[in-house]
Image (tube, rainbow, N blue to C red):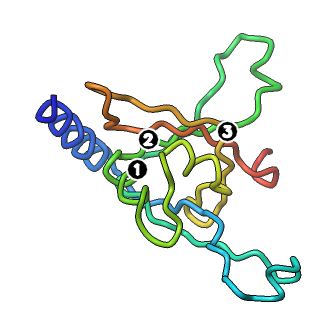
Amino acid sequence: MPNLNAAAIRAADSLLRGVGGTQVLLRTPAPAIPGDDGEQLGLSTPQFQDAPLCPAVYRRIRPKIGTPAALNTPIQYELLVSATAVESLIGNGPQAFASAETLFAVAFGVLIEGVLYEITSATTSEIGGAPYLYRLMLRAPLALKT
């Protein structure tokens, strides 16, 4: 199975790059500073760090025309991210995340072209029990909902 999974990962990476893959930033909380009195008392301003995810492709999800909910459906976006990009963030650095699910759960959102989108759900495409692609559903900020 390892060869099959490696082939699926290479295929997903090539596909994402081929359809105009871009780099987006995953915004997560910065690690706490040990021994900082202001931080221990909750007086310091929260810090964030942006981690690149590349290759990634995003698109707007259009509601089905003719359905009653089409007018009231919030604007949603789909982000497809390579498993190699996500795996590079898991278990590395000062904030080691146990899994991709944990990583996406603690993230504040995804920064795309200067706009921060909220992650509403994250799913995985797997082969042989190993992921090769992540699909994130994103919600646009209120300012973009017109």
Q: Splitting the image into 4 quarters, where does residue 128 fall? A: top left
- Residue receiving disc 1: 56
Q: Is residue 46 left or right of residue 122?
A: right
* Badge 3: residue crowd in 10 Å (few <14, some 14–19, many ≥20): some
* Badge 2: residue crowd in 10 Å (few <14, some 14–19, many ≥20): many
- Residue receiving disc 2: 80
Q: CA distance from mark 2 to mark 3?
A: 14 Å
State which mark lies toward you, 3 or 1.
3
Check the picture and name the quadrant holding the C terminus: top right
- Check the image and report above or below for 122 versus 145: above
- Check the image and report above or below for 72 versus 92: above
- Please state which of residues 39 and 111 is positioned toward the viewer in this rendering: 39
State which mark lies toward you, 2 or 3.
3
Q: Earlier in the sequence, mark 2 or mark 1?
A: 1
Q: Is residue 139 left or right of residue 57?
A: right
Amino acid under disc 2: Leu
Check the picture and name the quadrant holding the N terminus: top left
Q: Is residue 144 left or right of residue 19?
A: right
- Please state which of residues 124 and 141 is positioned toward the viewer in this rendering: 124
- Label 1, secondary structure: give it: strand
Amino acid under disc 3: Thr
Measured as percent of width and height from the top left, residue 32 is found at: 67, 76
> Do the residues bearing badges 2 and 1 touch, measured as CB atoms within 8 Å?
yes
- Label 2, secondary structure: give it: strand
> Do the residues bearing badges 3 and 1 touch, measured as CB atoms within 8 Å?
no
- Residue receiving disc 3: 120
Q: Splitting the image into 4 quarters, where does residue 107 fall? A: bottom right
